[in-house]
Image (spheres, rainbow, N blue to C red):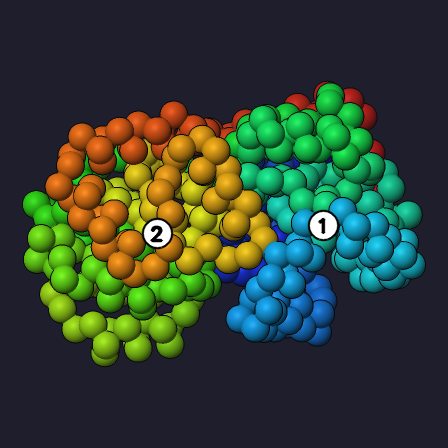
Amino acid sequence: MSYPLKVALIYGARPSGHYAAARAIAEFLPPSIIEPVFVDLSEVYPDFGPFVAKTYLQMLSRTPAVWDYVYDNDFVAFAASAFREAILPFSSQKLATLLIKKGVRAAVSTQAFSSLLITKNRRLARLPLFSVITDFCAHAYWPVSGVTGYFSPEKSTSAVLREKGVPPEKILLTGIPVRKEFTGPQPEKAAARRALGLPPGLFTVLITGGSRGLGALLPAAAALMPLLGKLQVIVLCGNNRKLCRQAERAHNSRFMHFVDFTDSPAAYYAAADLVVGKPGGVTLAETMAMAKPFIVYSPLPGQEQRNNGFLSRHKLAETAAGPEALELIVRRYLASPAALAQASRAMAGHARPHAARDIAASIIETLTSGPARRI
């Protein structure tokens, strides 16, 4: 066996939580053993990716209930089996050709579609496939067979995989992978704020819309305007630069800070007392790793609603139904350091900050413990 082994890290698009998870795992792969090969499906299928993204966003804005129904519905998944059996083997040929051309010896998939593509292609039947679930739920489209190992975020997700027929020995409970910057020693809040050019002694609320700046970021920021001066607000707009410029014009205040896409979000989490945002899986994993209280605001149908259900079941976060509710919850935390500390401890109790390290270790052990399979 010759090293390093080329391992494909496959995600849907960049930026995204799936991409962040892939990067996190790559950070823990020793270059002498594993050579990561990043594969962006939106580049492999340039026509299909924008179509899916456009359809998804339109459905969310116009008929969110339809998306919520389709997202995780066993009947719909069963009805789609004809598509999987007839279309996916054909569609997967392009991905298979790419992986074979690059000489990859294994694949790590951080979203369901790429896992489906690999399991439905005969040329990739011998390729070890590791599937990483990046939400606190396992929806109906994750494949049951053809996966070497599943990395699960929490116990109930593992249980769902077993119910769907995944052998228990193929499921490893690791958590959702986060990058190294979220796992090491963190600066004190005051020091983190100084590094960002912010007043060090002011209560700080971080509002995040994920990598794409989705969700009702402007209404959330506007809801906290009456509290400015008692607190300051940082809004992470992701790659939504249009929203960032619009927000800066609408909310011009020295206590309100709008940030374009950043490659080092941990610095902003470190500065925050409280995080507000959409409950994406990676966002929640990062927030837990930093032990920050979280308020759910404007969750998207589908995976984020289910992540919100996970938070509710474990009493980890409050949900603000609108701007007025958000202001009231923030006021309560602002007035009660004890409540803030309790919420912080709850999130820290569910943190698995070393998920990426554990996933990387498992992949390395599997690939190096026996003869490497070729495709």
Measured as percent of width and height from the top left, residue 221 is found at 26, 63
- Circle 1: is it few (<14), some (14-19), or many (20+) Cα within 10 Å? some
Hey, which quadrant is residue 252 in on the image?
A: bottom left
The three-letter code of the residue at mark 1 reads: Asn
Mark number for residue 320? 2
Name the quadrant of the C terminus: top right
The three-letter code of the residue at mark 2 reads Ala
In-image side of 155 versus 293 (left or right): right
Percent from the top left, x then y, of residue 92?
82, 57
Q: Which residue is drawn at 55% across and 30% down?
A: 154
Instruction: Tell me what residue is drawn at x 10 percent, y 48 percent.
Output: 202
Question: Are there few (<14), some (14-19), or many (20+) residues within 10 Å of tag 2?
Answer: many
Residue at the disc numbered 1: 73
Of the two numbered discs 2 and 1 on the same chain, state the one appearing first in sequence: 1
Taking depth in this image into account, of 96 and 294 the one nearest to the observer is: 294
Could you tell me if residue 374 is visible in this image?
Answer: no
Question: Where's residue 11, x and y in %?
Answer: 62, 53
Q: Which of 320 and 170 is in front in this view?
A: 320
**Vertical placement of residue 194 versus 12, above or below:** above
Label 2 element class: strand
65 up-or-down from 315: above or below: below
**Left of 17 or right of it: where is 348?**
left
Q: Can residue 95 be seen in this view?
A: yes
Q: Which residue is drawn at 17% across and 64% down?
A: 225
Q: Residue at x 35, y 64 (%)?
A: 217
